[in-house]
Image (spheres, rainbow, N blue to C red):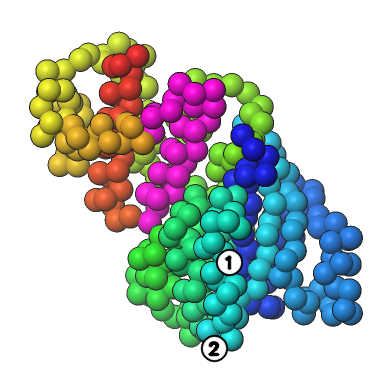
Amino acid sequence: MSTSLIRNKILVLGRRNVGKLSIIKQILSSSNQRIDEIILDQNNENGETSDNANHAGMKIPWKIITKYYTANVEFWVDETVHKSQLDSEVIDGYENEENGIGKVVDAILFIFKKNEPSTFDDIQAYLPFIQKYEPSITLAVGTGRNIQHDTIDAENDPFEDWCIENGFEYVDLDMKKRDDEIAERVGIERILEALQSHMWEDMTRLSKTNKTSDHIEDTNNKELSEAISQLNHKENNSHLESAPEFDDHNSAPFDDNDTEFFGDALPSQQEIESMHQHIFGDFDDEDGFDKVLARLNSLRERGKTLSDDERRKLAARVACSFNLHMNNE
């Protein structure tokens, strides 16, 4: 793999003073790291304070350390502007394949102020770039207290609605975890969770495992985790058998337990084969296992943006593709 095209960049977008640098500092501090003073000095050479400086062009390294892997990634910071000041050449530069930006960026952190709605509108200009290259992580992070916004019902939140429609996850940086929310992470903890649970390219695994479900366990997407766990249970108990329905391209191979678990979400054989090819198409390559993990993580992130019914259908396709893969082994 070419080191110049490793997809390990986190693009941080947002206007000046929305809190981009503050969020990066909080992320780094979680692993006792900080921004190098040289980077800050170079960025503030015009005499502006850190909070008021133009951070566009800053590149800040971060070594992610988890119990599963370590990975060297980099924050790329750029500043957005009001649409009336937008430079179309800058946006075109993002989409230009020759620049290679889309080939190395695998996460987007878009930062905006909840009490300044126009700062949220800035992301619209970058949607073609994001939709073209499909980074695995896309978070819209709201900062600043907005008393009027606090009174809005969560189900009618315009920020949340837009994010769901456009494949983003909305993170309210000021949201506090309720006492009854044991597993759900909010605010900066949720940003950390999203970035640390991703399988970054060129990462170094700290321990080997054959349990794929250990890497994709996530309480925010129970259906996918339960589906994989069910398949592992079947494999361990030797209950997987080839089914005659494999010859029927209008129905999937499944048993009574599958019917009870997935209900009317069961996919067709064609849908299973398509998902199997997507996940395991290059499994036999040298880095095939890492690619499978990365795709599963991407599917998990995608599942968070879907409705309950669509997420369950996605889980069924993933689970049945594992069934097919194990039957073929």
Tell me which numbered mark, 2 or 1, is placed earlier along the sequence.
2
Circle 2: element type: helix
- Residue sitting farthest toward the bottom: 84
Q: Is residue 96 left or right of residue 78?
A: left
Q: Nearer the viewer, mark 2 or mark 1?
A: 1
In this rendering, does residue 10 appear at all?
yes
- Secondary structure predominantly adopted by residues drawn in magenta: helix
Quarter of the figure that contains the N terminus: top right
Q: Vertical placement of 279 versus 131: above or below? A: above
Q: Is residue 322 above or below residue 141?
A: above
Three-letter code, disc 2: Ser
In the picture of the structure, the residue carrying the numbered disc 1 is 93
* Observer-nearest of 99 and 252: 99
Task: Name the spot of residue 261 as percent of width and height, x first.
Answer: 22, 34
Q: Find numbered disc 1 in the image and state the secondary structure of the residue it sits on.
A: helix
Q: Residue at x 89, y 67 (%)?
A: 41
Q: Tell me the residue that label 2 is attached to.
A: 84
Where in the figure is residue 323, as x and y percent of width and height?
Answer: 29, 24
**Quadrant in the picture for residue 257:** top left
Which amino acid does the dot numbered 1 rest on?
Answer: Gly
